[in-house]
């Protein structure tokens, strides 16, 4: 995790952009889904409930 923290604190090549390393997006999505639930389109959820 230290390497990821070092990478994230690096200066981005393009100002205003985030410096990322592989897996950061998935980690963020998982954390968000665990806290808020998994987003599902209402029409798809209705299909699931109709099964």
Image (spheres, rainbow, N blue to C red):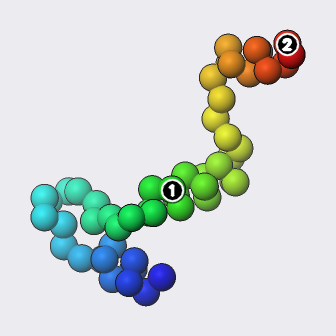
Residue plotted at (13% across, 64% down): 13
Left/right of residue 47 with respect to residue 49 in the rendered view: left
Residue 25, position as x, y percentages in the image: 45, 56
CA separation in Å, label 2 and label 1: 30 Å
Crowdedness near tag 1: few (<14), some (14–19) or many (≥20) residues, C-alpha within 10 Å = few
Q: Which numbered disc, 2 or 1, marks the residue that appears first in the sequence?
A: 1
> What residue would you read off at disc 2?
50
Residue 6 position (above or below residue 20): below
Left/right of residue 12 with respect to residue 51 in the rendered view: left
Residue plotted at (35% across, 67% down): 21
Residue 24, position as x, y percentages in the image: 44, 63
Residue 38 position (above or below residue 40): below
Residue plotted at (33% across, 83% down): 6
Left/right of residue 51 with respect to residue 27 in the rendered view: right
Residue 38, position as x, y percentages in the image: 67, 40
Q: Which mark is residue 17?
A: none
> What residue would you read off at disc 1?
26
Crowdedness near tag 2: few (<14), some (14–19) or many (≥20) residues, C-alpha within 10 Å = few
Residue plotted at (65% across, 29% down): 40
Q: Find numbered disc 2 in the image and state the secondary structure of the residue it sits on.
A: helix
């Amino acid at each position: 995790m230290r390497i990821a923290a070092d990478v994230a604190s690096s200066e981005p090549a393009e100002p205003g952009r985030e410096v990322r390393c592989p897996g950061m997006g998935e980690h963020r999505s998982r954390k968000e889904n665990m806290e808020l639930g998994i987003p599902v389109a209402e029409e798809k959820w209705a299909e699931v409930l109709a099964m």
